[in-house]
Amino acid sequence: MAGTKDAIVEPTEYYSTTSTISRILEDELGLKLKTEWLDSCLRGLETSVSGFLTFDDAKKAKLCFEKFLDSDMNCCGAGVLPSNVDQLNSVDLIGPFVLQVDEIENVSQPCQDRYKEASPGFDRCLKLSMTDGVQRVVGLEFQPIKDLKVFSPAGLKVAVSNVNVSVGIMMLAPEGFQVLGGSVEELEAAWQRFVAEVNKPPWWDVFNQL
């Protein structure tokens, strides 16, 4: 059949697009992924998405990003933050940087209330433990961010830009913070178990009810 051969995309030609897609994700979104994860993602999309090989690189990158949202950045992230970010002080980072939020606590409250929901406001200060897959960084809610909740799902992906780093801590404000979505099932299950344990009433309260 005359036109059939021309329509076939050879695997070597297809997988050579990995570096192009990686560059799109890093340059446009501030997301850097491990090559082996991106290769695996592309193979999976080729199998599951009809006509995937005929898509342009921008569309392939978009589909890879959607898969990434529910993947664990601790495993697939290749590191996008400046080296030794936890040692920076009074430094402004332009970004954007796509990060994963593994844990949130309300540090404006005493220990027993840090993992209870609280509305955004100047009496709330959320502390975020985040990673780019290589480095871990702490973010502090410097100004109220309405899209953030104490019970945001573990593994949530966010984009941070134009952020000041003070004594290794990102000072987060709404104008430089975007919630992208996503979650990681295993992290969320572990997080829910931890919160349930922390929020248990003290043993003496239980004893007094007997």
Image (cartoon, rainbow, N blue to C red):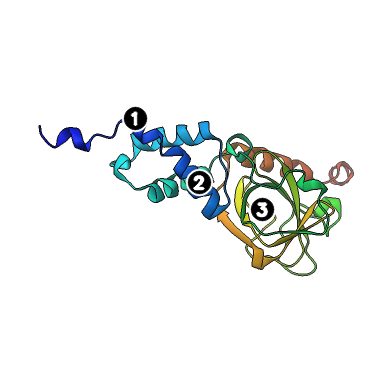
- Residue 49: % across, % down: 33, 41
Secondary structure state at the residue bearing disc 3: loop
Amino acid at pointer 3? Phe
- Residue 95: % across, % down: 64, 56
Look at the image and tell me whether residue 57 can be seen: yes
Mark nearer the viewer, 2 or 3: 2
Are there few (<14), some (14-19), or many (20+) residues within 10 Å of tag 3? Answer: some
Q: Residue at x 51, y 31 (%)?
A: 36
* Residue annotated with mark 2: 23
Disc 3 versus disc 1: distance between alpha carbons?
Answer: 43 Å
- Between 18 and 131, the one lying in front of the other is 18
Judge left or right: residue 57 versus residue 116.
left
Disc 1 versus disc 2: distance between alpha carbons?
Answer: 20 Å
Are there few (<14), some (14-19), or many (20+) residues within 10 Å of tag 1? Answer: few
* Residue annotated with mark 3: 151
* Residue annotated with mark 1: 11
Disc 2 versus disc 3: distance between alpha carbons?
Answer: 33 Å
